[in-house]
Amino acid sequence: MKIDKDTLHKIAHLARVEIKPEKEEGYIKDLEEVLTWVEKLNELDTDGVEPLTNMSFEENALRPDERSHQLEHERALKNAPKADDDYFRVPKVLD
C-alpha cells in the first residue's frame, strides 16, 4: 500500500504525535513495510478459524475471599508521616 505525506499527517494527527519534516520519508517507508506485511496476512486461508479475543487461553485463577489477619489502627498509623487520630494525613490534592 502506498502512503503519501497527507496520509502520514492524518495518521499523526489522529495519534496526536508530532512528526519532524526530516523524518517524514523514514516514517512513510516504515508504514509501507508494515502495511505490505499485513496485506500478506490477507492471503492466508482463515476459514474455520475462530477469531481471538485474547492471545492467552488461560483463565483467571481466582481464590476464594477469606478473612485473614488484619492490621490494627495503631500499628498501621505508627509509621505514617502524618496521622490524625484514626486517619492518615495526606497533602491536599483538589482545591
Image (cartoon, rainbow, N blue to C red):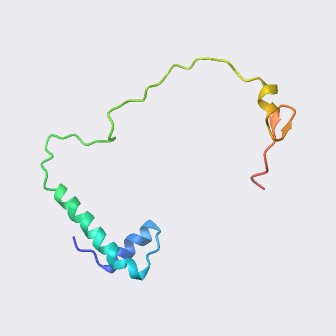
- Image check: 65 left or right of 77? left
Q: Give the farthest residue toward the bottom.
A: 21
Q: Nearer the viewer, residue 39 or 72?
A: 72
Q: Residue at horizontal 23%, vertical 59%?
A: 38
- Image check: 93 left or right of 67? right
Residue 72 vertical placement versus 29 (above, below): above
- Image check: 8 left or right of 71? left
Residue 58 vertical placement versus 42 (above, below): above
Q: Residue at horizontal 29%, vertical 78%?
A: 4
- Image check: 9 left or right of 75? left
Looking at the rendering, which quadrant does residue 42 occupy? bottom left
Q: Nearer the viewer, residue 34 or 46?
A: 34
Q: Residue at horizontal 32%, vertical 78%?
A: 25
Place of residue 45 in the rendered image (x, y in percent of width and height, measured from the top left): 12, 48
Looking at the rendering, which quadrant does residue 29 occupy? bottom left
Q: Residue at horizontal 78%, vertical 45%?
A: 90
Residue 69 vertical placement versus 76 (above, below): above
Place of residue 88 in the rendered image (x, y in percent of width and height, measured from the top left): 79, 38
Place of residue 60 in the rendered image (x, y in percent of width and height, measured from the top left): 42, 29
> How many tags in the picture?
0
Q: Quadrant of the image for the C terminus?
A: bottom right
Q: Quadrant of the image for the N terminus?
A: bottom left
Place of residue 85 in the rendered image (x, y in percent of width and height, measured from the top left): 87, 32
Q: Give the farthest residue toward the front.
A: 79
